[in-house]
Amino acid sequence: MKITLDLDVCAGHGQCEDAAPEVFTVNDQGLVVQLIENPGEEYRAKVEDAARRCPADVIKIED
Amino acid sequence: MPMNRIVVAGVSLAGLRTAEALRLEGFTGEIVMVGEEQLFPPYDRPPLSKEILKGLWQEDRGRLKVAENLDPTLILGHRVTALRASDNEVELDDGTVLTYDGLVIATGASPKMMGSIDTSIPGVHVLRTFPEAVALREAIGGSPKVVIIGAGWIGCEVAATCRDRGLDVTILEYFPQPLERTLGPIMGAWAGAMHRAHGVDLRCGVSVSGVSGEGRVERVDLADGTSVAADIVVLAIGVFPETKWLEGNGFDLENGVLCDETLQVVGASNIVAAGDVCRWPNKMFNRTMRVEHWSNAVEQAAVAAHTLIHPDEPKGYSAVPYVWSDQYDAKIQYVGTGGEYHSILEGSTEENKFVAAYATDGVLVGALCVNSPARMIKYKRFLTTAPQMDLIEENLP
Ligand SMILES: Cc1cc2nc3c(=O)[nH]c(=O)nc-3n(C[C@H](O)[C@H](O)[C@H](O)COP(=O)(O)OP(=O)(O)OC[C@H]3O[C@@H](n4cnc5c(N)ncnc54)[C@H](O)[C@@H]3O)c2cc1C
Ligand code: SF4
């Protein structure tokens, strides 16, 4: 799965980490960091949940 | 009962996300969305008191994204005025009657009014909708003297935005401290000190009796007989859940419509609720609550849709509420609910970077994180383990 992150609008709500802790974390600057480069299909549901719960619409799933 | 048509009442965050989740749950029938507001896609509310009010965003930014497969039947610009649950029908303000197999209640909340204040007087504003945000932004365009009634989240954000623009700002609050309802008196005082340091004339413990002026607002009158000069007044004393249309069905409508753990309305098997309008038993904290925050609406949407489509596989919703607010240079994030202020766990108020603990009966129930975004989510997870305060030093996440 290819994910793009729009870091310009990330506001450190951490909802992504809450939804998919294996894939996302929030760093000390309050920005999302992707922990697995191209996460496998087993994470799709969680990453979709993360995208949906992100208040700033940062996470885009490209394929 | 087969589900052919689901009516969603309220087309904002909770209504839209529930409708999308119905499709994710496999619903292929008709989704009729009835909303009072005209804009579709609906706009997101948090930016209204932030980017939109500050003028940082173009007006078309801040709309919610809509899933491509939603395929809704939209009835916009109309209110649902009545529900007859025993007949599975709702009535709209133009007399239209819609039958449904399933109903989603997502009518949210609206600003509380103060009986003595007529909000149609020029210069008096409330802030819940996009047009109201645009009107307020235009009203603060010159250099008016702004008086905000109510120091809750919205009042405080409006104050911060107005001060950032260099305006003269007074906040009138009935309680002894701003944000006291969420943050309690001690951290409320921290917030108060922040607003005063940024030049707000914050007056707490005052009671407003009304507004007055010739043809437009000129003063806010206080119960002690004095008054405060004002060019613009923002009434921000909280919201009430939109449940009036549900009356007459035997539902419990005390502070929102009462649902069970799966967000099914108590007393109706084919009706669910989500968002600001919903009160439900939150197992995490062993009590019923209604939450007026963004993340709650989104998370409840998924559960409510599941309950409607798959009642045979019940999923409970238990959650740690989360709210954020941006004021001056403070990114404020609060996870959890209620409790008494306990102590500062990390950082310090002097650095304007800290985590403060809230506890009930020796158990951590809330964490106020200021300028500590990486920490907030750790505490959110930590809270679900009901940590004991006397052991907290060793166990910090
Ligand atoms: C200015 C502002 C700033 C905010 N900032 C934050 C923030 O920083 N962080 C945070 O967590 N939360 C914030 N919130 C709260 C968040 O926006 C709400 O929790 C969220 O909008 C709730 O969504 P909802 O769909 O349940 O209700 P609402 O957004 O209130 O939507 C309900 C919809 O139903 C419609 N409706 C009502 N009655 C009827 C009827 N009878 N028939 C048809 N339609 C009806 C309404 O017109 C509305 O469109 C903010 C809210 C505001 C107003
Ligand atoms: S939820 Fe969105 S805004 Fe928040 S940290 Fe994750 S990506 Fe950033």
Image (cartoon, coloured by chain):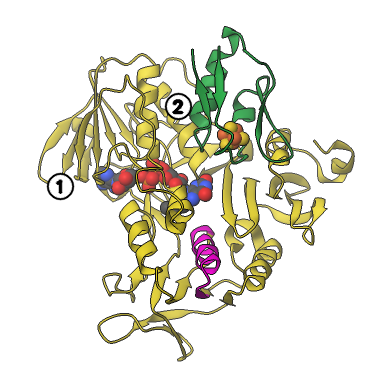
Chain colours: A green, B yellow
Quarter of the image for residue B268 reads top left
What residue is shown at x 62% (from left), y 23% (from top)?
Answer: A20
Q: Chain of mark 1?
A: B
Callout 1 and callout 2 share a chain? yes
Identify which residue is drawn at 60% across, 29% down.
Answer: A16
Give the residues in magenta: B153-170
Is residue B176 visible to the viewer in this orientation of the structure?
A: yes
What kind of residue is marked 2?
Answer: Ala
Relative placement, left or right, of B333 versus B134 is right
Percent position of residue B206, x then y: 53, 79
Q: Measure how far apart labels 1 and 2 are at the Cα level.
A: 29 Å
Q: Going 42% across and 47% down the picture, which residue do you hit?
A: B45
Ligand 2 visible in quadrant: top right
Q: Residue at x 61, y 63 (%)?
A: B180
Which x, y percent locates residue B396? 83, 39
Output the chain of dot 2. B
Q: Quarter-wise, where is residue A2 in the image?
A: top right
Q: Is mark 1 within 8 Å of ligand 1?
A: yes
Q: Secondary structure at mark 2?
A: helix
Query: Which residue type carries mark 1?
Result: Asp
Magenta region includes residue B324? no
